[in-house]
Image (cartoon, rainbow, N blue to C red):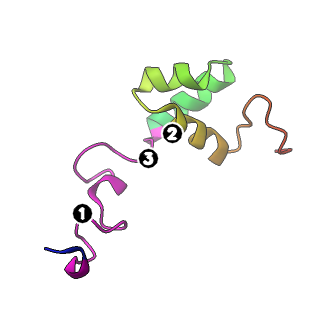
Amino acid sequence: MSGATAGPRDARSVRGHPKCYAGGLGAIRYPTEDERIHIADRFREKATVRAIAAELGRSPSTVSREIRRNGMPLPGDRSGR
């Protein structure tokens, strides 16, 4: 199947990609609720983003993105949130 004829559920399409939702194949793209709670708890305890990522087996950028999305300001962040 070529990219031009790919349907909405083909693995090459963004919305139908199996990693975009928990029921798909492979790694889960977004943190689970338990992971989000772990991130929030550990961040409150002043753990580093890298340490939290290592504990969860996730990329530091994933953890950092989750912290920014959910209103937990990163150290040195002057955005005023």
What number is the disc on residue 62?
Answer: 2
Decide: few, some or many residues near mark 1? Use Cα within 10 Å; few <14, some 14-19, many ≥20.
few
The C terminus lies in quadrant: top right
Provide residue 40's location: percent of width, then percent of height. Answer: 61, 31
Instruction: Kindly give the residue lying farthest to the bottom in the view shown.
Output: 5
At a point 22% along the width and 76% down the height, the residue shown is 6
Disc 1 marks which amino acid? Answer: Ala
The N terminus lies in quadrant: bottom left
User: From mark 2 to mark 1, how far is it between C-alphas?
Assistant: 22 Å
Q: Which residue is mark 1?
A: 11
- Secondary structure at badge 3 equals loop
Q: Which residue is mark 3?
A: 30
Among the two numbered marks 3 and 1 on one chain, the one whose residue lies closer to the N terminus: 1
Residue 21 in sight here: no
Among the two numbered marks 2 and 1 on one chain, the one whose residue lies closer to the N terminus: 1
Disc 2 marks which amino acid? Answer: Thr
The magenta-colored residue range is 4-33
